[in-house]
Amino acid sequence: MFPDDRYDHDATPLAMAVRNQILDARAQPRHPLPRPDATRVFVVANQKGGVGKTTTAVNMAAALAQHDLRVLIVDLDPQGNASTALGVEHGEGTPGVYEVIADGTAIAEVVQESSDTPGLFCVPATIDLAGAEIELVTLVARESRLRRALDAYLAETNDTDDRFDYIFIDCPPSLGLLTVNALVAGREMLIPIQCEYYALEGVTQLLRNIELIKAHLNPDLEISTVVLTMYDARTRLAAQVADEVRAHFADAVLHTAIPRSVRISEAPSYGQTVMTYDPGSPGALSYLEAARELAIGRDTRASQPAEAQ
């Protein structure tokens, strides 16, 4: 049974068939995903709010961790939603990413492990981060403070069993200094794009900023992954937006689209990702497939996006 069976009467036949397949698959042995040769550092960004940015970051991270990979989330959004979804402490006074950026505290001193998902860690965001944009203006090398902290942390763990396979930096929905720090620290971009009207408009300025960052601060940054979110297979608009995004970003777009899902929306209110809240739901299945694409490559990508209720 699933944790929110009160919604089962609304499920479509396709969604129920997917659930049955998931239940059958749970009895099969799980094959771990391959570890990358070096830590992959993703910046999860989109200046447009409400596109599923944090949701994508935490669920992709959880899906990878469930396949025996070590994953770190750096919560760079003052709202702290990623910290909430991972069930880590991020109340006022909790050491977190603010101390790392503003005070130079080592990441090792503030990182926490998720209680629900072994191998999934978080550098939490607290309310103090809300003032970091102003404080960073006067600091030396303000654009690269997160980069230096991450590089130092990775150097400490690189040759040990505690090496991270993936790092996801969850950005605020803006293009301020916090996001600039993320763009300088990252090696790859993961851009969630909502399957709604004006979807690409919010990405235009982000792409300009990425080019500026590549030209002046981080030439290694590349857009490697684009994830279509809130996909509704019942609407023509969703298909049109998906076609536009694929035409623009080509092979960077994952074949797996993330459907609209009640379970995905509910999970953070319980301090969980959908991967632990309802692992048999179409939303969880979609993030699992997207994580596989990320880890293995496009050869394993699904041919059609999943449909949710």
Image (cartoon, grey):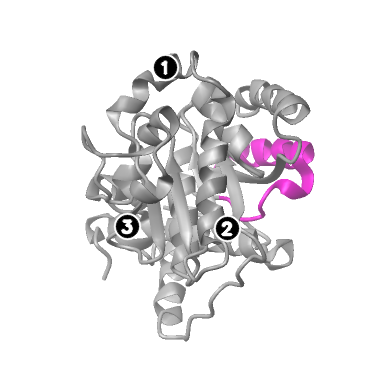
**Residue drawn at point x = 62 percent, y = 54 percent:** 40
Q: Quadrant of the N terminus?
A: bottom left
Q: Amino acid at mark 3?
A: Ser
Res. 23 image quadrant: bottom left
Residue depth check, mark 3 versus mark 2: number of the one nearer the observer: 3
Report the number of discs: 3
| Image quadrant where residue 134 sits | top left
Q: Main secondary structure of the magenta part?
A: helix
Relative placement, left or right, of 32 versus 261 is right
Start-end of magenta stretch? 232-257
Q: Crowding near pointer 1: few (<14 within 10 Å), some, many (20+)?
A: some
Q: Nearer the viewer, mark 3 or mark 1?
A: 1
The residue at 61%/41% (across/down) is: 186
Q: Which mark is residue 290?
A: 2
Near mark 2 (Cα within 10 A), the count class, few <14, some 14-19 or many ≥20, is many
| Residue ID for mark 1 | 135
Residue holding disc 3 = 114
Front of the two marks 1 and 2: 1
> How far across and down, in percent of the image, does residue 264 sit?
38, 49
